[in-house]
Image (cartoon, helix red, strand yellow):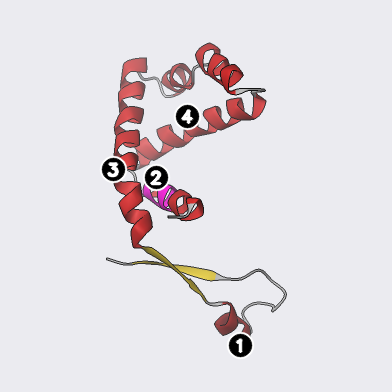
Amino acid sequence: MSEAREQFARTLYIQNLPKSDQILYKYIDQIEAELEDLALTKNHYLQLLRRQSPIKQAAKHFNMSEKMVYETVQRIEAKIADEVTELSERLELVEFTDVLILNGLCDAKEEKKYFVLNRF
């Protein structure tokens, strides 16, 4: 399975979470990404996570207990682990570049255009 397909499935899954879970998860994910960008090494990243805990920041930001934030994130991560692989295997990429060019909807010099089909 391609990493891009799995990442796309993960994004689709997160977009379909209940709004409150989606907002919380994206908030924490963004903080983690920012810390990862700052980190010089993997060990440094772990140090940054401990010092600038995304869980603590989210708890303060959303006026929730750290325990509730942690449990929510763990629940979402468990569901992602269980369901994203299956979802990504059902996704099918179909190239529609030629059809779009023939209908004047894109330029031939543009990147290839794909539609994602979810096979049930």
* Residue to which mark 1 is pinned: 102
Q: Nearer the viewer, mark 3 or mark 2?
A: 3
The answer to which quarter of the image holds residue 62 is top left
* Residue to which mark 3 is pinned: 82
The answer to which quarter of the image holds residue 108 is bottom right
19 lies above or below 68: below
Question: Residue placed at 64% from the left, 77% from the top?
Answer: 106
- The part of the chain drawn in magenta is 9-13
Q: Farthest residue in the bottom direction?
A: 102
* Residue to which mark 2 is pinned: 14
Name which residue type carries label 3: Asp
85 lies above or below 33: below
* 44 relative position to 16: left or right: right
Name which residue type carries label 2: Ile
Q: Nearer the viewer, mark 4 or mark 3?
A: 3
Question: Residue placed at 38% from the left, 55% from the top?
Answer: 88
Question: Residue placed at 41% from the left, 47% from the top?
Answer: 10
4 lies above or below 108: above
Q: Where is residue 116 in the image (x, y as percent from the top left)?
A: 44, 66
Kindly identify which numbered label has been placed on residue 81.
Answer: none
User: Separation of disc 4 and disc 3 at Cα?
Assistant: 20 Å
Describe the element under mark 3 as helix, strand or loop.
helix
Q: Farthest residue in the right direction?
A: 109
Dot 3 and dot 1 residues touching (CB under 8 Å): no
Disc 1 packing (10 Å; few <14; some 14–19; many ≥20): few
Name which residue type carries label 1: Leu
Q: Position of residue 25 (x, y in %)?
A: 42, 34
Q: Who comes first in sequence, dot 2 or dot 4?
A: 2
